[in-house]
């Protein structure tokens, strides 16, 4: 357990470089929402939980009261997900939904601890075809997802658990940056 906490602290220190990037994402995302856009998010397993956590904070609220923001966790519609999985290929699970819900000017946030999840990479490719901005939270770089997305924060950590824990910290940082950019009063 002590080693896990040490790894977490060390990896969190290495993430300090991401502070200006996350602040810029918050500013960009505020413009997306002010223009009627939305955020889509996807991931598998624990990354799906983090994606849904992000969309929950946006539709609900993070720390401060504000209007609800349009955000969709693509794995959360189980009927669509199972129909797509049954009728198409697993790689299409999120890409087909991006094609259905994504509009030019929207943002897709992709979460993957490996950065190589085939269905998440396919979602990013579909988003690019539509003019949807793509951001990724991944594990160590280089990886296909970080290379494909418009921007990415790759968490340099030795374990999937540590990567996922820091993805949650990044999700919260993005929510804080967005609220600041929207001018949500403290």
Image (cartoon, rainbow, N blue to C red):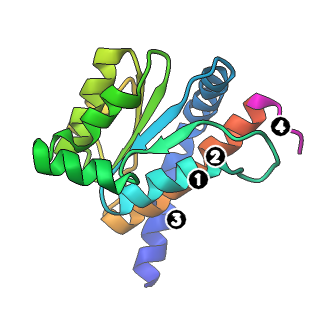
Report the mark closest to the observer, 3 or 1: 1
Residue at 31%, 19% in the rendered image? 128
Image coordinates for residue 26, horizontal then vertical, percent: 63, 32
Question: 95 left or right of 181?
Answer: left
Circles 2 and 4, Cβ within 8 Å, touching? The answer is no
Mark closer to the chain start, 4 or 1 = 1
Disc 1 to disc 2, how far (Cα)?
Answer: 5 Å
Residue with the mark numbered 2: 59
Q: What is the distance, in whole Å, between disc 3 and disc 1 at their CAs?
A: 26 Å
Q: CA distance from mark 2 to mark 4?
A: 15 Å
Residue 133 or residue 106, whichever sits in front: 106
CB atoms of marks 3 and 4 within 8 Å: no
- The magenta span reads 182-186
Tell me the quadrant of the picture where the C terminus can be found.
top right
Q: Label 3 belongs to which residue?
A: 9
| Real-space CA distance between mark 4 and mark 1, rounded to the nearest whole angstrom | 17 Å
CA–CA distance in space, label 3 to label 4: 30 Å
Residue topped by disc 4 = 184
């Amino acid at each position: 357990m002590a080693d896990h906490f040490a790894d977490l602290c060390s990896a969190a220190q290495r993430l300090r470089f991401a502070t200006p990037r996350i602040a810029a994402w918050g500013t960009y995302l505020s413009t997306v929402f002010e223009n009627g856009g939305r955020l889509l998010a996807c991931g598998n397993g624990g990354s799906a939980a983090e994606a849904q956590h992000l969309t929950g904070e946006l539709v609900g609220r993070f720390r401060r009261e504000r209007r609800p923001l349009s955000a969709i966790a693509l794995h959360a519609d189980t009927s669509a997900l199972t129909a797509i999985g049954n009728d198409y290929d697993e790689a299409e699970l999120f890409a087909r939904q991006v094609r259905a819900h994504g509009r030019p000017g929207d943002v897709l946030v992709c979460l993957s601890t490996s950065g190589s999840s085939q269905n998440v990479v396919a979602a990013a490719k579909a988003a690019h075809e539509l003019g949807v901005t793509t951001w990724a939270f991944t594990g160590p770089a280089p990886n296909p997802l970080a290379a494909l997305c418009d921007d990415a924060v790759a968490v340099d950590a030795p374990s999937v658990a540590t990567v996922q824990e820091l993805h949650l910290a990044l999700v919260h940082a993005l929510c804080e940056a967005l609220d600041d950019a929207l001018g949500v009063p403290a």
